[in-house]
Image (cartoon, rainbow, N blue to C red):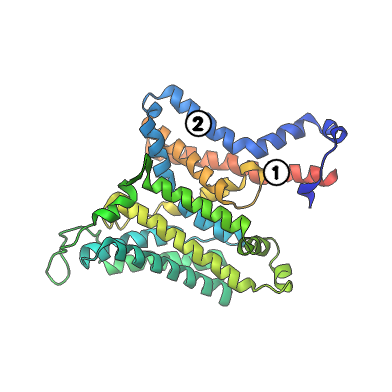
Amino acid sequence: MEARIGKTPAAEASVPMAEQVREFVVRYGVIAITIFLIVFFVATEDTFRKSTTLLSVLKYASVIAIGGLGVTTAMVVGGIDLSIGGVAGMAVTISAMTMVIYNQIGIIAIVAVLISGAFVGLVNAFLIVRLRIPDMLATLAVMFVVQGAKLIFVNGQSVSSGMPLPDGSFAIGHFTPEFLAIDAGFVGPIPMPVMILIVITLAMWVFLTRTRWGRILYAIGANPEATRLAGISVSRYRALAYVVAGLLAAVAGLILSSRIGQGDISAGNSLLLDSVAVALVGMSVMGLNLPNAWGTTLGAILLGTLVTGLTIAAVPYYAQDVVKGLVLVVALIFSFTLSRKKARYVSAV
C-alpha cells in the first residue's frame, strides 16, 4: 500500500518544504484548530476558564458525537444514514410516552428506545440492501416517516407530566430519577454523558479497527465487489452497519431525553446536520481520510468548543451556523483537497 512506503533520509530531504507543510496540516490541522479555539476562548472569556465549562463542552459534544458515530458506521461501508436525527427525536418521544403516559420505570423506557432504534436500522438495511434503494434516498424517506410517526403518536404535542390525554384523563407518570441520571449523573468527577461517550468511542474504535467484523466493514466501503468475491456476505455486513447506526442514534436520543426531561417533539431536529458534520470533520484527523471513531469524537469536541465559546461571547445563534459552516469547510479542505495532493505526491515517489 502507498501509505506504507518508507522514506530514506535522502528521500525526506528531497521532499519540498511546501509538501512537508501540507502533510503537517493534513495530519494535525483539526487538532490544531481545536487547541487554538480552546486557547482563544480561555484568553478572551473569563467564563470559559472555569472547570465547569470544559465539562459543559464535553456534555454538549456527547450527543453529537454519539450521533456522529452512527453516521460514521454507515460511512465505513460506503453509505450514509440521514435518519439519525429522526431516530434520536423518536427516542425522546418514546421514552417520554413510556414513563409519562404509560407510567413505566426508566429501564423499560431505555429498552423500548434501543429496540426502536435497532428496528429503524433494520428498516434502513432492508430498503438499502434488499430493495437496492440508494442509501441517501432510503434513509431520508425513513427520517420523514419516523418524524411524522412520532407526531401522530402524541397528536403533535410535547409529552409532559400532567398533560391531558385524548380520553379526557391526565398523564400521571413522570421521568424517573434513574432515567434523569443518564444526563445528570456522575461517575466520580466525570458526567455520565461524557463517560457514555468515552465507552462508546472506545468500543467503536475496537470494533472497527481491532475485530474481523470492523475490517470487513472497511473492506466493503473500499471495494464491495472484491469483498464479495472473497466469499464474504456483503449484504449481511452492510445491514449490520445500519443497525449499529440506529442503535447509536437511539442512545444519543436517550441522553437528549434525559437532558430536557420531557418529550419535546422538536428534539433531535438539528442533530442530523451536526452528526454528519462531525463525521466528515473526523475523516481529516491525522490525515486518515476515512471514517473513524476517534476522529468523529474529536470533531464533536471541536464543534462543542466552538458553540460553547460563541455562546459565552454572546454571538447571536443565527451567526453561529455561519461559523460552524466555515469550520466544516476548512476541515473538508484538509480531508479532500490537501490529502489528495499528498496522495499524488506519495504515488509519484
The residue closer to the viewer here, 343 or 254, is: 254
Q: Amino acid at mark 1?
A: Ser
Q: Going by the picture, which residue comes out furthest to the front?
A: 188
Picture coordinates of residue 90, whole percent (x, y)? 36, 62
Q: Quadrant of the C terminus?
A: top right
Disc 2, SS:
helix
Residue under the image location 48 percent in, 30 percent down: 38
Label 1 Cα neighbours within 10 Å, binned few <14 / some 14-19 / many ≥20: many
| Disc 2: which residue | 37
Q: Is residue 57 left or right of residue 28?
A: left
Q: Residue at x 28, y 69 (%)?
A: 153
Q: Residue at x 71, y 64 (%)?
A: 223
Amino acid under disc 2? Leu
The single residue placed furthest to the bottom in the displayed view is: 130
The answer to whether residue 156 is seen in the rendering is no
Q: Earlier in the sequence, mark 2 or mark 1?
A: 2
Q: Nearer the viewer, residue 199 or 160?
A: 199
Question: Distance between the Cα atoms at labels 2 and 1?
Answer: 23 Å
Query: Is 213 above or below relative to 256?
Result: below
Left or right of 322 on screen, residue 312: left
Residue 270 coordinates in the image, percent (x, y): 41, 51
Q: Residue furthest right?
A: 10
Residue 229 at what x, y percent from top left?
74, 73
Instruction: State the residue at coordinates (45%, 41%).
Output: 321
Could you say where residue 301 lies in the image, as x and y percent from the top left? 48, 41
Q: Answer left or right for 276 relative to 91.
A: right
Where is mark 1, residue-wise?
A: 339
